[in-house]
Structure formats: structure tokens, C-alpha cells
Amino acid sequence: MREITGKGQGEFEMECIEVTAKTVDDAITEGLIKLGTTSDKVETEIIEKGSVGFLGIGSKPAVIKIWKKFSIEEFVRGFLDDVFRAMGLEVEIIVKKSEDEKNIDVELKGEEMGVLIGKRGQTLDSLQYLTNLAVGKQVNEFVKVKIDTENYRKRRRETLESLARNIAYKVKRTKRPVSLEPMNPFERRVIHSTLQGDKYVNTHSEGEEPYRYVVVTLKKNI
């Protein structure tokens, strides 16, 4: 047992309740029922151990405080659930933590996922950015949250890789540079990585965020 703080890492408020029962074990059981969880997911503080007294006279009930342990997965799920509730959306949130505990993968499922993806994934990216900001305030270590729905990230990557190859072909044919539309850092990295091994073209980025874009040029020795 440790002293209760009422919070986990950072400023994440945890639900803490005080329970009174005949014994400590009874109080813990009642607390688990009220919190809707299991014993391995809670921490407790004994306020009063209780006593049976003599022939029932002078008996005192046991009093404990019980609260759920901080869980980054539950925090992410709760944060996103609040966001979707405010948006009036019903979304199934599946949260998985990597073995190295450095990455949190979130899969969203529902009937209106197009709304969450937005134009070229901008809404999904913004949601991911806000979630990472919220998580960053709760933990002192690096943890990255990746949010996806309907396999959008993979489909977008494949589209960008195809675009990169087509643009490279155009540059080789016309021998003129081509500037792509503004892209976020992830999309620019896909373009760069797709063409980094190309013998005939180079890539570089120009402009300032959020209007930074990739330029594909013919190598000078061609």
C-alpha cells in the first residue's frame, strides 16, 4: 500500500473512491465492483483497518481509498472517447501498446471514418498530433501514438510512392524540375525515401510549414 496522490504521471486525474465495509477485503471487493475493474489494475490505501470489538461492542468498520492505476492505454482511449463524444461520433477505439512500450497503435472503427480522415488525412493527422500532445503531458518518457482507420496510412503511403515514381519519370523525360503540392512531414519523407535510390533524380524540400513541399530535380551529371 502507498499513499494516494489522486493522480498518475503528469496531471491525469484518476477516479478515487472511499469505501467502508466490515473488513478490508470486503471493502476492496466492493471498491472493485464500483470501479468496474480487477485487483491487478488498482492501488489502495487503508484509512482504517477496522476491528470486531468485544461481542460486537465497539466494532469499527474498515475504510479504504481505492483507485485505478495509471494506464497510458486507458488514458489514450479516454482522451479520444471524449473527443468523439464532443463530435457526436460513435467510434470503436482499439488501443495496442508495443512490446518496447514506446509506441501506442490506435485503430478507429465506425461508420463515419471519412470525417475523421479528412482531406488528405489532415483531420486524422491533427487528431494524432493532439493525442500525442496530451500523452506528452502525462509521461516523462518518449511515447509515440499512431492513429489509423480503414488502413488509411498504408493506402496513403502507397499512393505517395506511386506519385513519386511518376514524377521522377516526368522529370527524366522533360529534364525539368517538378514541385509537388505542400505536404506534411510524413508525406514528404515518403517521397524522399521512395526516390533516394534513383540514379537520375534528386529530391529536396522548400518553403515553410505548413506549406513546405518537395521538389524533384534531374541530377546534374545526367
Image (tube, rainbow, N blue to C red):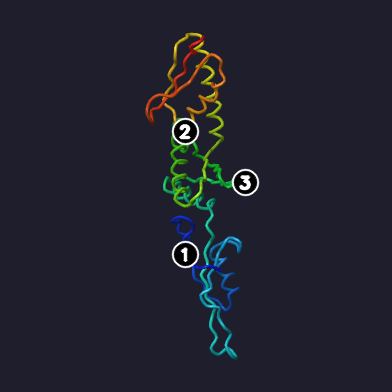
Instruction: Please name the residue that numbered disc 1 is placed on.
Output: 5
Q: Nearer the viewer, residue 85 or 180?
A: 180
Question: Counting residues from the N terminus, which is met first, the one under dot 2 or under dot 1?
Answer: 1
Identify the secondary structure beneath mark 1. Answer: loop
Q: Tag 3 or tag 1, which sits nearer the N-term?
A: 1
Quadrant holding the N terminus: bottom right
Tell us which disc is closer to us: 2 or 3: 3
Q: Earlier in the sequence, mark 2 or mark 3?
A: 3
Query: Gap between marks 1 and 3, in whole Å?
Result: 28 Å
Q: Give the residue drawn at x 46%, y 46%.
A: 84
The residue that mark 2 highlights is 121
Name the outermost residue toward the front. 221
The label shown at residue 138 is none
Q: Are marks 2 and 1 in contact (CB under 8 Å)?
A: no
Amino acid marked by disc 1? Thr
Q: Identity of the amino acid at label 2?
A: Gly
Q: Amino acid at mark 3?
A: Glu
Give residue 214's position: percent from left, percent from top: 45, 23
* Disc 2 versus disc 1: nearer the observer: 1
Q: Residue at x 56, y 73 (%)?
A: 27
Indicate the secondary structure of the residue bearing disc 3: loop
Q: Nearer the viewer, residue 23 or 132?
A: 132
Image location (x, y in percent) of residue 35: 54, 63
Going by the image, does 27 lie left or right of 137? right
> Depth check: 190 or 108 in front?
190
Say few, some or many: other residues with alpha carbon within 10 Å of mark 2 (under 14 / 14 to 19 / 20 or more). some
Q: CA distance from mark 2 to mark 3?
A: 27 Å
Residue at image mark 3: 99
Secondary structure state at the residue bearing disc 2: helix
